[in-house]
Amino acid sequence: MRIEETTAADHTILSLKGEFDTPYVSEFNQKIEELVGARKPRLVLNLRFLRFVNSTALGAMVRAQKKLRQFGGDMVVSQPSAFCRDLFEKVGLQKVIRIYEDDAEAIAEIAEAQRSDVSVHDAATVLFSYEDDEKKRSAPRPSEIGRIRHVEEDALQFDWNAAGSGLSNDDIRKLLEPGTNLRLKFQIPLAKKDYFEIRSIVETSELPLKGTGIRVRARFAQMNAGDRSALSQFVQDMRVLKNELRNATGN
C-alpha cells in the first residue's frame, strides 16, 4: 500500500492506494500518531484507489477514528472504491465512519460527529457437499449452498434453505445429522483472497428453520496450516473490531 498525504491548516487527507492489510497497519498507525502529535486530528481517508482491506486494517481504521476523536478531531472516508464501499456496508462500518462522495464534501462535514448503532454481520455463502457415498446418492444435488451465520477458529455455522429440494424435514435431518462428514468451500475476503476448502464434521443440526430448512454447526476436521492461521487471525481481528465498534457507538 502507498499512503499519499495532503495537509492543510485545519485538516489532512490521506490517500490510501493498493492493498491495506496487516503488514501496513503499523505504517498507518504511525501516520495517526504523527497527526495527533502535530495537533491535526481532522482526517479524511480517500479510498478511491484502495483495492483491498483485511479485518486487521478495518480495526486499525476504527481505532484511528477513536483516537482522533479523543483529541478533538474526527476521521471520515471519501470516494471509497467499490470494494471498500461494499465491505463497509457488509460490516456495518459506514454507521461509524461516515462516507462522502468527494474530498470537498468530506472536509466540509468533518467537524460534525455522528454515531449510531452498529451490527456486524457476514453475508457470505458456503458450498457444502457430502463425503459419504450413501448420502451423496440420497442428496438431490452434488452440492448445496448455505448462508454463513458464524465463523469460529474451529467451526462454521450455516443455514440451508432446502425449499425446492423436494426433501422432507426428516430427509434433511438424516442428510445433516451429527457425525456427517462434509466438504466445505467458502470465501472470506477479509481473511484471504481465495477460497477455503475444509473437511468438516457436523456437530449439531436444528430443525425446522422457517419451514424447510436447517441450521448446521460443522467442526473443522482437516485443513492446512495456512488456512488455520488465516481463520484464527480473522476471528481474533473481528472480535477486536466488534469491540471497537461497540465502544465507538457507546454500546
Image: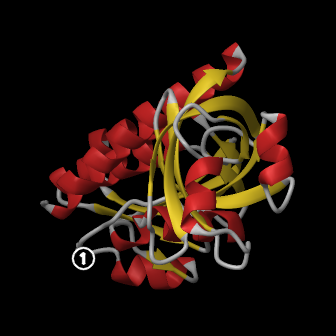
Percent x, y for residue 86?
A: 61, 69
Q: Which residue is mark 1?
A: 114
The correct choice, above or below, for 228 with respect to 30 in the image is: above
Q: Secondary structure at mark 1?
A: loop
Residue at image point 70% right, 45% down: 19
| Residue nearest the observer in this picture, 180 or 84 | 180
**Which amino acid type is shown beneath numbered disc 1?**
Gln
Q: Is residue 84 left or right of residue 10?
A: right
Q: Is residue 207 left or right of residue 15?
A: left
Name the quarter where the C terminus is drawn.
Answer: bottom left
The correct choice, above or below, for 170 with respect to 185 in the image is: below
Residue at image point 61% right, 74% down: 79
Question: Dot 1, how many residues are within 10 Å of its Cα: few (below 14), some (14-19), or many (20+)?
Answer: few
Percent x, y for residue 55?
A: 52, 43
The correct choice, above or below, for 224 with respect to 73 in the image is: above
Percent x, y for residue 30?
A: 44, 33
| Residue nearest the observer in this picture, 224 or 247 | 224
- Toward the left, the furthest residue is 250
- Toward the top, the furthest residue is 225
The correct choice, above or below, for 40 with respect to 57 in the image is: below
Q: Is residue 73 left or right of residue 177?
A: left
| Residue nearest the observer in this picture, 204 or 65 | 204
Residue at image point 69% right, 41% down: 1
Residue 39 appears in the picture as rendered: no
